[in-house]
Image (cartoon, rainbow, N blue to C red):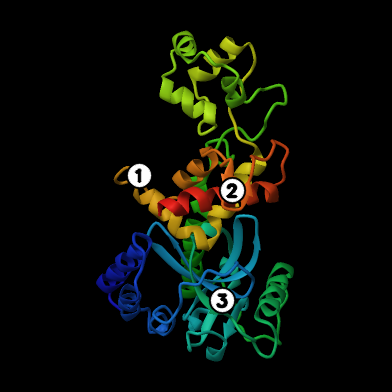
Amino acid sequence: MSQDERGELHELLGELDQISPSADVLNLAAEWALPSELASFVGASSNDFPSVAPGQLWRLSWLGNQMLAVVLSQSSWWTRVAPLTTDVDLADEYTLLIDPRCTSLALQTATFLRASASVPTFTLAQYLGDVGQVEGRDAVEALLSLEVAMIDGTLRSDLSTGPMLAQSDWDRQEFLDSLQESMNWFEGAALSVLDDDGSIAGGSSSLDDSEADVSDLLRTSQDLPSLVEATGIAPGRLLSLKTGRAKPQGPEIEVLSSYFGSKVRVGHPENMRIAALELIAEPANRQLWLEAAQSSEAGAPLSPRKFLVDLIETPIAARTVYGPTSAPGNNATVEEWKRALRDRIAVRFRSES
């Protein structure tokens, strides 16, 4: 494949993140495949989004870059993966060679553990099936045992791997560096949902018990005109603060604290933000945050951040199709928040899509 053809392939695959891909688009992408692996599985793969689990094969996608990877483990909104390619000639002693019968690619592939990385789960764009048995043993077991050997600096003669990597082997060294650089790109996707201090978007990660929720304070205040006059905050903005859709920012914090004689809370509970990010990271919700990102200002990157902030700021409905509900307290667990936020997605975001 020429450099120009690779450039066109890169642009074509990037379009999969811009639209809801149809079968025609997927088949077109398959025609531009690296050798023929995409033709054998992308066009035939379904739009199913199972729960992420070890041993699955996924297409990673972030801001137009693509990568095939095998899931090694999954925790919270992170998934540890190892890149998979058809470059078996470049495999080293810690690269597991996988028989064509073990994947839907119908080609021999190589999973490079030296380039494994923990990536945000929201970069998992397309499920491409499971990796089957490798030499009579579970694929995940084989990969993890080879990873242990890599950490210990030992070799595994009972697994199909590439030859030992020598320092003078510039071709393989360069290829591994390129793979690791690609995986760093996907790891960096996490920055799109983090604030400058490293906390998940949505406010301070610590909440002082002495602080009062501004929505509670505003609900007890019945004199809206006087409040507008005293604080200088617009009525529409006060309504957003009152319903919990927004948290006070900048000068609003000092003005409201002074007006009510109490420190006001500016952040959302950490467990709430973790729960929201875990939900957004689920591949089944990928299309929702892509659509939210597309509706933002022109030129903005297709990131889950807008959907994340909207999900956190939108008030919990007083009643859902499942019956009455209320917002969990500040000390609620991640799972309790996830149940409430799932209702929020079902009631608001899916009804708008």
Quadrant of the frame with the C terminus? bottom left
Is 21 placed above or below 31 here?
Answer: above
Q: Which of marks 1 and 2 is in front?
A: 2
Which of disc 2 and disc 3 is earlier in sequence?
Answer: 3
Disc 1 crowd rating (10 Å Cα; few below 14, some 14-19, many 20+) is few
Q: Distance between the residues labelled 3 and 2?
A: 36 Å
In which quadrant is the N terminus drawn? bottom left
Does dot 2 land on a helix, a strand or a loop? helix
Q: Which of marks 3 and 2 is in front?
A: 2
Q: What residue type is labelled 1?
A: Ser
Residue furthest out toward the left: 4
Kindly identify the residue that appears in the image at 51 percent across and 87 percent down: 108
Residue pictured at 71% horizontal, 87% vertical: 158
Looking at the picture, tell me which residue is in the foreground, 62 or 3.
62
Residue 307 percent across, percent down from the top left: 47, 47
Residue kind at label 3, given as amino acid type = Thr
* Callout 2 crowding tier (Cα within 10 Å): few <14, some 14–19, many ≥20: many
Is 50 left, or right, of 36 in this rendering?
right
Q: How far apart are marks 1 and 2 (CA)?
A: 22 Å
Helix, strand or loop for disc 3: strand
Residue 77's image quarter?
A: bottom right
Counting from the top left corner in percent of width and height, residue 49 is at 52, 69
The amino acid type, in three-letter code, at marker 2 is Leu
Any part of residue 77 in sight: yes
The numbered disc on residue 296 is 1
Of the two numbered discs 1 and 2 on the same chain, state the one appearing first in sequence: 1
Tag 2 residue: 341
Disc 3: which residue: 111
Image mark for residue 266: none
